[in-house]
Image: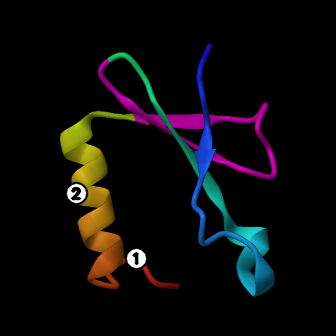
Amino acid sequence: MIEWRKSSRSGGVNDNACVELARLADRVGVRDSKDPAGPRLDLSPQDFGGLVARIRRGELDL
């Protein structure tokens, strides 16, 4: 069974924009917390780390 986790910082004003993460065998699962049965991304740990780095640098801000 996959154990999905949401950030402890989720909630409040931005509650509509939460993702959940799961540790898979050799991947990191990412899904929309509002649509748990919907699609998910399965990223390698390296790709997930790159995604987090880009988010922190503001490269993906809308």
Mark 2 Cα within 10 Å, few/some/many (few <14, many 20+)? few
Q: Please tell me whether residue 7 is drawn above or below residue 14 in the rendered image.
A: above
Bounds of the magenta segment: 26-42
Q: Quadrant of residue 50?
A: bottom left
Choose between 13 and 17: the one closer to the eye. 13
Q: Please tell me whether residue 16 is drawn above or below residue 3 in the rendered image.
A: below
Task: Please give the name of the residue rendered at 27% of the width and 34% of the height, measured from the top-left corner.
Answer: 44
Q: Amino acid at mark 2?
A: Gly
Left or right of residue 3, residue 58 in this image: left
What residue does disc 2 label? 50
Screen quadrant of the N terminus: top right
Q: Give whichever of discs 2 and 1 has the lower sequence position.
A: 2
Q: Amino acid at mark 1?
A: Leu
Left or right of residue 38, residue 57 in this image: left
Q: Residue furthest front?
A: 8
Query: Which element type, helix, strand or loop, lies under badge 1?
Result: loop
What residue does disc 1 label? 60
